Amino acid sequence: MIFKVPRGTQDILPSETWKWQQVEKVILEACDVYRYKEIRTPIFEQTELFQRLVGDTTDIVQKEMYTFTDKGDRSMTLRPEGTAPVVRSFVEHKMFGYPDQPVKLFYTGPMFRYERQQAGRYRQFVQFGAEAIGSADPAIDAEVISLALDVYKRVGLTKLKLVINSLGDKECRAAHKEALVSHFNPHIDQFCPDCQTRLEKNPLRILDCKVDSGNPLIASAPSLADYLNEESASYFESVKSFLEDAGIDYEVDPNLVRGLDYYNHTAFEIMSTSEGFGAITTLCGGGRYNGLAEEIGGPSAPGIGFAMSIERLLLAMEAESKIFADEPTLDVYIITLGETARRPGFKLLNELRAAGIRTDLDYMDRKLKAQMKSADRLQARMVVIIGEDEVTEGAVQLKIMADGTQEKVPVGELVEKIIKNTTR
Ligand code: HAM
């Protein structure tokens, strides 16, 4: 039997993890500057949490969840997204009572969706997300969008497009829903079975259907923009003004509806406009979700957030030919010759590492030539050679690889000498 990584998942090998670590570093730096604090929630939650918050009629809940019954006969689901768990935690830990509001949180971790695998779409992917909960100030909408863009900017991406829309509040949604039902109802038999179910429950989802996207009735459907009440329209105007104040360019797309049910008012996506990018161009999605905390028994706590996958961020970097600086290489490779040098060599290895010097040693009992080759391959800056004579003398040979010079150095002076030769 040959075992392979499950479909839609991937091993991230050492040659790639360096990039991931760099992205994670950038995320930490950006969140620090914006004052978002990290939250870590479990990988699985009660299934009902996602059914209630993400929405029963969404593709995620209907088709994509990894749901299982645990040994206590409870239905659990591997998290398909991070907002519902964060809001659950916000309510459970009464974060609405924290003196500093809004509560600004971020997370990075794996999410799971049973989707058809293609470039940029996986069954396990890592999302970086941020949520600001507790404020209905349109300026925070602009802040959240700015944070997402800032992360992209910090990794060097420039070919980006921000698309925004307003989904209005409950009142305008209800009026728009009625208009959508009247529009689609007479022709609903032209649509896929999912859309036929959506018509009654959530006709907005029809606009977002992957199967029926080419149907002209979608293009001619009543636009939510025409149903925004005064309050929602003025909120949207304010968000746009704050984006302008932050120097952020945007496009308004009245058809941007997003695939999750919890949104109202601001919805946004950031796309890659890079030519080399694949079919899926959305790098990041987010929006406002007033009323979500109330949905699970919490107080009214308006929130806004976004999530982006690291996989798509890295694909966008590749498409724009942006690369991280090389991984730091080895400072010192210790070569030991003969049995007597083994223990002094190992002792030295530990001393150099304790001094913060990147050091490695041969564990394969190789000859001098082969050890030298390893040092070359690992791009060691220096090589320390310990033979029988050196052990007796309490010294080592220190070779600087850049110019090939070699000198005998007493063990007591070695750390200092090496640090001098290590430009970090
Ligand atoms: P979402 O649009 O479902 O929103 O996902 C956000 C981002 O996660 C996408 O733009 C994409 O970068 C990434 N993503 C989603 N599915 C996949 C996949 N199968 N493979 C790779 N990447 C994927 C949410 O998840 C919301 N929780 C965002 C949010 C936070 N809204 C408010 N706060």
Image: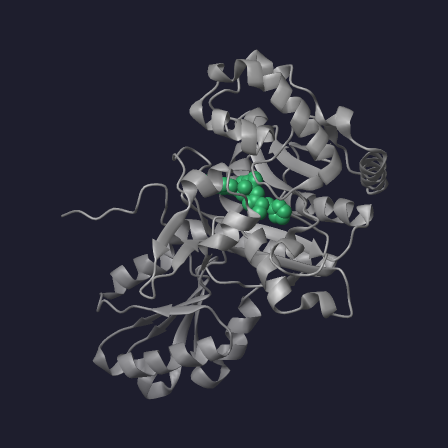
Instruction: State the residue at coordinates (58%, 12%).
Output: 216
Q: Which quadrant is the C terminus positioned in? A: bottom right
Q: Is residue 327 above or below residue 224?
A: below
Instruction: State the residue at coordinates (48%, 14%).
Output: 190
Residue in front for this viewpoint, 230 or 358: 230
Q: Can see residue 130?
A: yes
Location of residue 30 in the rendering, given as x and y in whole percent from the top left corner: 68, 55
Q: Quadrant of ligand 1?
A: top right
Location of residue 115 in the rendering, given as x and y in whole percent from the top left corner: 41, 37
Location of residue 235 in the rendering, given as x and y in whole percent from the top left corner: 82, 40
Q: Is residue 328 above or below residue 199?
A: below
Q: Is residue 285 left or right of residue 364?
A: right
Q: Is residue 198 left or right of residue 114?
A: right
Residue in front for this viewpoint, 18 or 338: 18
Residue in front for this viewpoint, 386 or 328: 328
Q: Is residue 101 left or right of residue 51?
A: right
- Total marks shown come to 0
Instruction: State the residue at coordinates (27%, 79%).
Output: 342
Residue in front for this viewpoint, 332 or 235: 235
Location of residue 13 in the rendering, given as x and y in whole percent from the top left corner: 37, 51
Q: Can see residue 326?
A: no
Q: Is residue 400 above or below residue 237?
A: below
Give the image quarter of residue 142.
top right
Colour scheme employed for the rendering of this structure? one colour
